[in-house]
Amino acid sequence: MPKFVASRSLQEPLEWNATLLKGDVAEEVQTLKQQPGGSLLIYGSGELVSTLMRHNLIDVYRVMLYPLTLGSGKRLFAGEVGKTTLTLSNTKTTSAGVVVLTYEATKTSA
């Protein structure tokens, strides 16, 4: 599966089998979304999610709710991302009690 990395500090060549996104990350992701193939997945980057949310480039959100509170930490949706209407499309509870909530972004016409 192809891998793409959004980074301000890394430079090619990358040490693993991945392509570095160059320039405007929102434009790069828009281009990737228009290519044939599977879905694009984001792992572990709240800042990237916030950037893509501002550009309406996320179609599906999978939120994993763990049965644990820490009392502090990063916000799920940080920064100015604007309003995004989501529709719950699926729920699943794992044997460890983690609830996986799948939401689809409501498409709006511009």
Image (cartoon, rainbow, N blue to C red):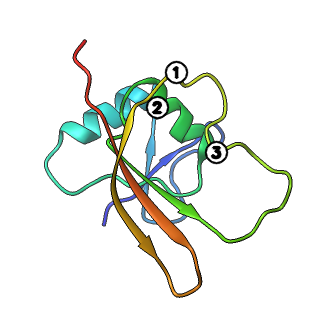
Q: Nearer the viewer, residue 59 or 13?
A: 59
Cα separation between marks 3 and 2 = 12 Å
Contact check, label 2 and label 1, Cβ < 8 Å = yes
Does residue 5 lie above or below 69 as drawn? Answer: above
> Given this view, does label 3 or label 2 mark the residue nearer the observer?
3
Residue tagged 3: 76
Kind of residue at badge 3: Leu
Q: Residue at (17%, 43%) from the top-left corner? A: 35
> Given this view, does label 2 or label 1 mark the residue nearer the observer?
1
Does residue 40 lie above or below 67 as drawn? Answer: above
Residue tagged 1: 82
Residue tagged 2: 53
Mark 2 and mark 1 lie on one chain; the one further toward the N terminus is: 2
Cα separation between marks 1 and 3 = 14 Å
Q: Where is residue 90 in the image (x, y as percent from the top left)?
A: 33, 61
Q: Residue at (54%, 63%) from the top-left corner? A: 64
Does residue 25 lie above or below 10 as drawn? Answer: above
Image quarter (top left, top right, bottom left or bottom right) of the C terminus: top left
